[in-house]
Image (cartoon, rainbow, N blue to C red):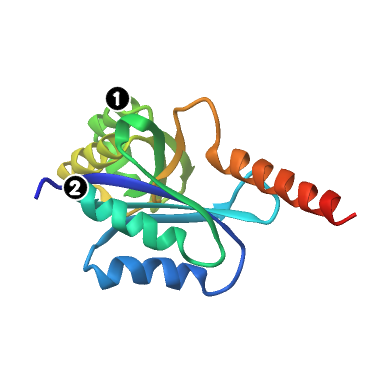
Amino acid sequence: MDKKLYTIIVHSENFAGLLNQVTAVFTRRQINIESLNVSASSIKGVHKYTITAWTDKDTIEKVTKQITKKIDVLQAHYFTDDEIYQHEIALYKITTPTLEEKPEVSKVIRKYNARIVEVNAVFAIVEKNGMSEEITNLYEELRRLDCVLQFVRSGRVAITTSCFERVNEYLADREAKYRQSKQQES
């Protein structure tokens, strides 16, 4: 099977326990979730899950259909990297003495357009947002300079590159059907 990284974007109502139901779909198929980000969406009362996983097209289609069947899920769609714009954020805690003693540390930070957001006598915090590969590469270069104390990265956040948001169309259509049924009852 030809595995690639897929991003599933799920829009749901905000109810407790739904995250567990969604992740259980991956667990049952023994698919490891690479990253998971859940947040409020631009629509009041609707949350957005951005999930990445390595799998094949047939499996991602089945997983997406299973997620869509969950009662509180409004919509779920899967995307390849060329169909979305995605970003991550990372924080690197590095030693201040090494930052001060090795000019190459500052050069590496500037090379990746990262920024230093906190400095004290013991450590400095570097922030980088961007593509996954850039975040990993910066980590590897800082690690080679032996200055990384801690490293953490967020899950992927993504938006589609299409000109419309599918969930907005879905909700508008649902509202129109509701109003039409109310008019027919009157």
Q: Would you say residue 167 is visible in this rendering?
A: yes
Q: Who's the residue at 38% across and 67% down the image?
A: 23
Mark 1, other Cα within 10 Å: few <14 / some 14–19 / many ≥20: few
Q: Who's the residue at 58% across and 73% down the image?
A: 16
Residue that mark 1 sits on:
111
Figure quadrant of residue 4: top left
Figure quadrant of residue 115: top left
- At label 1, the amino acid type is Lys
Disc 1 versus disc 2: nearer the observer: 1
Q: Is mark 1 on a helix, strand or loop?
A: helix
Q: Is residue 30 left or right of residue 21?
A: left
Q: Quadrant of the C terminus?
A: bottom right
- At label 2, the amino acid type is Asp
Residue that mark 2 sits on:
146
- Judge whether 90 appears above or below 73 on screen: above
Q: Which of 171 and 9 is in front in this view?
A: 171
Q: What element carries label 2?
A: loop
Does the residue at mark 1 contact the one at mark 2 (Cβ under 8 Å)? no
Question: Given the current orientation, which residue lies at the most extreme right position?
Answer: 186
Q: Would you say residue 128 is visible in this rendering?
A: no
Q: Which of 155 and 102 is in front in this view?
A: 155
Mark 2, other Cα within 10 Å: few <14 / some 14–19 / many ≥20: few
Percent coordinates x, y for residue 108 in the rendering: 27, 30
Q: In this view, does 159 lie to the left or right of 99?
A: right
Q: Who's the residue at 28% across and 26% down the image?
A: 107
- Judge whether 146 appears above or below 130 on screen: below
Percent coordinates x, y for residue 133 in the rendering: 25, 37
Mark toward the start of the polypeptide (1 vs 2) = 1
Q: Which of 103 and 39 is in front in this view?
A: 39
Q: Who's the residue at 47% across and 67% down the image?
A: 19
Figure quadrant of residue 78: top left
